[in-house]
Image: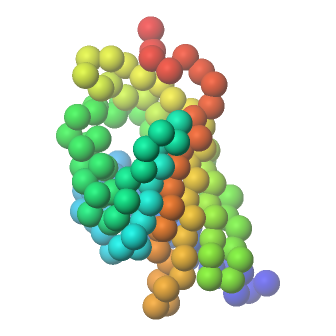
Amino acid sequence: MGATTDARDEVRNVLWRLNAAWREGRPEAMTPLLHPDVVIVPPGFTMTVRGREACVASYREFATRAKVHEVRVREPRIEVFGATAIATTGFELAFELEGQRYREAGHDVWVFAREGGAWLGIWRTLVVGPGPGRAA
């Protein structure tokens, strides 16, 4: 049980660092936490962002184009299976993009792989729950 608890704590720490980096407008700080072949699938699963540089660039673009008004992140649920971990975190996000205000809520889902003694993000998506989308 101790090894799994330690792994969950390690994954929680990586997840916290990933979230802090984008929230603080430092997407480049995510680089060492991501696998070189990381994949991000935005909500709706209509496209895929592949590779560490492209993923960091997508966060950089969001940080420069959007004004975040509020972020609430719940404690993640982390499951560990050997060298693979899945972290699911509930969230609420209020932001403005191109003059429109949005309020989203749902779950942030990350998959991590342990390589070279470190947990690296290898896959991510947001599952946005039903709601108003564009704020009134």
**Where is 132 relative to 36, above or below?**
above
Judge from the rendering whether residue 113 lies leftward or rightward of residue 65; answer left or right.
Answer: right
The quadrant in which the C terminus is found is top left
Q: Position of residue 9 (x, y in %)?
A: 60, 74
Q: Residue furthest top?
A: 136
- Residue at image location 69% in from the left, 74% down from the top: 80
Judge from the rendering whether residue 70 lies leftward or rightward of residue 28; answer left or right.
Answer: right
Q: Position of residue 56 (x, y in %)?
A: 29, 58
- Residue at image location 33% in from the left, 17% down from the top: 100
Judge from the rendering whether residue 39 lies leftward or rightward of residue 8; answer left or right.
Answer: left
What colouring method underlies this structural image? Answer: rainbow
**Where is 118 relative to 103, above or below?**
below
The quadrant in which the N terminus is found is bottom right
Q: Residue furthest bottom?
A: 116
Give the mark count.
0
- Residue at image location 63% in from the left, 54% down from the top: 88
Judge from the rendering whether residue 82 lies leftward or rightward of residue 105; answer left or right.
Answer: right
Q: Residue furthest front?
A: 46
Q: Residue furthest right?
A: 1
Q: Is residue 24 visible?
A: no
Q: Is residue 134 visible?
A: yes
- Residue at image location 37% in from the left, 29% down from the top: 95
Q: Position of residue 55 (x, y in %)?
A: 33, 57
Q: Position of residue 110 (x, y in %)?
A: 55, 59
